[in-house]
Amino acid sequence: MESIDDILAQLKSEYQEKDNPGQQKKQPPVGKEKAIEPKLPNLPPPATSGRKSFSPSSPEDALLSQIKAEFAEQDKAEELKRQQQIQEEKIKQERIKQQQRQALTKEAEAWLKKLNPRSAEGLWFEEFAYSYSSKLEAAIDYLQALKETQS
């Protein structure tokens, strides 16, 4: 199997031959006298702006279309894989968050059992928990804030 570089070099040379018909070898005229043709130096093809137009039925176009399709397919597969990895990471982070929440809930329940409601901290906590739906939710937020400030 030829390498991609060989195929591309071959395609390039074929396109240059098609684009520069003046550089192809001319047949000498048939007859007694031979025409003397001046030799011109090989000049690079003139720079063209924009894309070259090729006939849609050429085998080169078919090959290029096939290569483009393969790359597009690979890009789609990589994007899908990346999205799956992102989704898996989100699920993993959500599980970790739930586990931390469960651990914090247990810790808050234990803290509430130890809390003396008549102590300064107990009285402060009663006022703090007033805006929460439950004392447990207030205790969870309070302990979480304590952990964040101590870290």
Image (cartoon, rainbow, N blue to C red):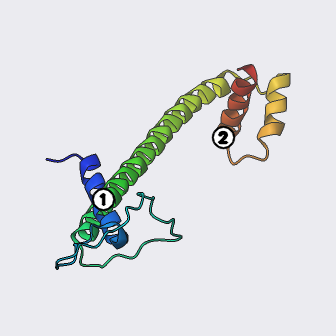
Q: Which residue does the image show at 34% across and 75% down from the upper left?
A: 54
Please, is residue 119 above or below residue 134 in the view?
above
Q: Is residue 130 left or right of residue 86?
A: right
Q: Label 2, on which residue?
A: 137
Residue toward you, 25 or 64 = 25
Question: Residue at horizontal 42%, vertical 72%?
Answer: 52
- Position of the C terminus by quadrant: top right
**What label sits on residue 13 in the rendered view?**
1
- Within-10-Å neighbours for mark 2: few <14, some 14–19, many 20+: some
Report whether 148 appears left or right of 108: right
Which residue is at the far front? 32
Nearest to viewer (mark 1 / mark 2): 1
Where is residue 39? Give x, y as percent: 37, 61
Q: x%, y% of residue 130?
A: 79, 44
Picture quadrant of residue 120: top right
- Viewer-nearest residue: 131 or 25: 25
* Residue 132 screen position, x and y as percent: 73, 46
Does 53 sit left or right of 98 as displayed?
left
Q: Is residue 102 above or below residue 66?
A: above
141 or 41, which lies in front? 41
Q: Distance between the residues labelled 1 and 2?
A: 75 Å
Disc 2 on helix, strand or loop? helix
| Amino acid at pointer 1 | Ser
Q: Which residue is drawn at 25% across and 48% down?
A: 6
Of 52 and 151, nearer the camera is 52
Please say whether residue 149 is visible from this viewpoint.
Answer: yes
In the rendered image, is residue 118 in sight?
no
Q: Quadrant of residue 73?
A: bottom left
Q: Label 1: how many residues lie within 10 Å, few (<14), some (14-19) or many (20+)?
A: few
Q: What residue type is labelled 2?
A: Glu
The reply, left or right, for residue 97 in relation to residue 77 is: right
**Mark 1 or mark 2, which has the lower sequence index?**
1
